[in-house]
Amino acid sequence: MIVPGASSLPETGGRDDQVGLPDPEELRVALRPPELPLPAPRTPLELAQRVSDLTHAERYREAVALAATPLPDGGSSSPAADHAVLASARLAALARVGTDEEVAAAVGDLLRAQRRAGYAAQAAATAQVLLERGVLREPADGGARSGGSLSDGSRAGRRRAAPATVTPELLAVVRELDVPHRRARGAVGPASADLAGPAGPAATATDPRRRIRVLRAALDALPAARADLLGAPEPLLRLRLAQALEAAGLTDSATTAALDALELLEEVDADPEAEASRRADPHRVRIAAHAVLARTLRASHPLAAVRHALDALGVMRRVEDAPLRVGLVTDLLEALTAAGLERDASFAAGRLASLQRSLRRDELRTGPLLAVAGQRIRVGRADEAREALEEVRRIAREHRDRSTDLEAARLLATLYEREGDLRGSLLQLRRVAADARWLSDDLATPAPRRGPFLRIELEALALVLRRAMDLGETPTARAAARAIERRTRPDGGRLLLPSALLWDHRVDARVGELVAVAAAEPDAEELPELLDGAREVIGLAPGGHEERALYWRAYLDEQHALLLERRGEREAALAAALQAQAQWRNQDAEADDLERIDALVARLSAEA
């Protein structure tokens, strides 16, 4: 059994930065274009894989045309199960661009192929799922339409087979396999959840926690349904569970599920002739599992993440799918950056900037461009970063994508900060806060993502408060503090973040507003009220956070001393400073805090 999380990785003696450094030649090979043209498929399984690759690359008409290509021997020497796999791949493409008649015929081909392969129960379950998803339509008499009937007895005079039994366990598993949804002709978007990002398209349309429950139920049902299923569905189910766990922010559990998927694939590969190895895209699950690991291990084991991204790109040599390749190079770039390999990251960023132009849909280009911009900012290539971010913002505006616009604004704020343009940084931080607030309050945002968006908003507002104070823009600073107060008040409804974090932001806002007003107008009449308000909020510290409250009390007393010094009240200022000094020394304070308060006390003592 795999130990959950990153602890399941091989031990590196605590020096991840010295183990498994990528070879420059290996990196260049991984970033080369695919070996095109790929050899012509000679078996139904090879043809099914190519059709599946084109479908995932959103080249649906090419996939349909390729599926109609005759094989060298007509496929007569291949097992019936291989033809069922090919029929499934063809249906996935036709469900996107085919007419109702073409789709109905493809459904019939798939169901007949599954029954001929000896999987009548799976054929019946597939038909039921196709009905649920609008791919197969049921006429008024309750039977399935021509081409999609649940039995083989469609010809006159032929005896109808007894209907197969569809158990709840079988149905639960089939619903999570590659059974397509009916889309409007010409609709765009990922064809499957395999590699459309964390948890696939469901990440933005479905609560990932619900997906986790459904997938775990399917895995629990798998042992009872395994005998009625063509191929080995468990690696695919484990992969999709890993993607859903990643979308829910459960990175350790996602790592475990992805490693489980790879381990199961190794068992299947040990006997390539076995029935369980039959699948339309045998490489795609492996690529997707490595991609999940490249993301989930980025923070804790960056070099392991680099290795998984390189392994995924190595498998991509046999897969023709530009969006997938660009996504993997993006994961590789972010892993190289996390590992501190800036020279390799610069090379990967240059390659990615070129590769992303091959994508047909602009929405798919924003992620790679953001990764390139982030890398260019880190190495000081501001013009290239600004060019990439301008393109991202154009795409985000055209598609009304606030999440992408938010990420672009965050990077622009960092860019302006590095250039010393505090006013430009302030403008972008305000944009970040506005987008994050909109996304946090949007009912279409999945529940697990609302909390992170609220946290982004609060952190951006806190930075707005500080930048406005640096620029002397007191009204802007006060507006940011009041916005934080509104978003963190105890009676604000269901908590999206821990109460301790909300309290900390609220105290920060109260103290920040006090400091901003005191700096602008030391004799303001409202200062005593602001001071009492800050002390009141500090006193509301949640249980277990007494040390943080001590920090805030010491900091507030120190600021009070500075305020009194500005007013010329030296003796009162010294008394407040001595009180702050005692509080700093009664806690585990940082050296900078102690040096600062000691300097203040010394200065006030000398002046007194």
Image: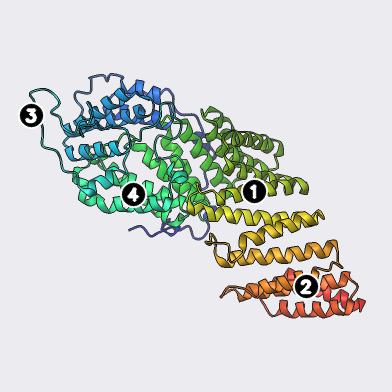
Judge by depth and name the residue closer to the eye, 23 or 226.
226
Image side of residue 134 versus residue 367, left or right: left
Q: Nearer the viewer, mark 4 or mark 3?
A: 3
- Residue 182 x/y as whole percent: 36, 33
Image side of residue 564 versus residue 416, left or right: right
Disc 2, SS = helix
Q: Which residue is mark 1?
A: 434
- Residue 284 x/y as whole percent: 38, 38
Please state which amino acid type lies under the numbered disc 3: Arg
Within 10 Å of disc 3 (Cα), the crowding (few <14, some 14-19, many 20+) is few
Here the colouring is: rainbow
Image side of residue 23 versus residue 316, left or right: right
Q: Which residue is mark 4?
A: 263
Disc 3, SS = loop
Q: Quadrant of residue 466?
A: bottom right
The reply to whether callout 3 and callout 1 are in contact (CB within 8 Å) is no
Q: Which residue is mark 3?
A: 159
First-in-chain label (1 vs 2): 1
Disc 1, SS = helix
One can see residue 344 in this view:
no
Q: Residue at x 77, y 47 (%)?
A: 423
Q: Quadrant of residue 594?
A: bottom right
Within 10 Å of disc 1 (Cα), the crowding (few <14, some 14-19, many 20+) is some
Residue 558, labelled with which disc?
A: 2
Q: Quadrant of the N terminus?
A: bottom left
Please state which amino acid type lies under the numbered disc 2: Glu
Disc 4, SS = helix
Q: Residue at x 38, y 60 (%)?
A: 3
Please state which amino acid type lies under the numbered disc 4: Glu
First-in-chain label (3 vs 1): 3
Q: Residue at x 67, y 34 (%)?
A: 387
Marks 4 and 3, Cα distance to the nearest angstrom? 45 Å
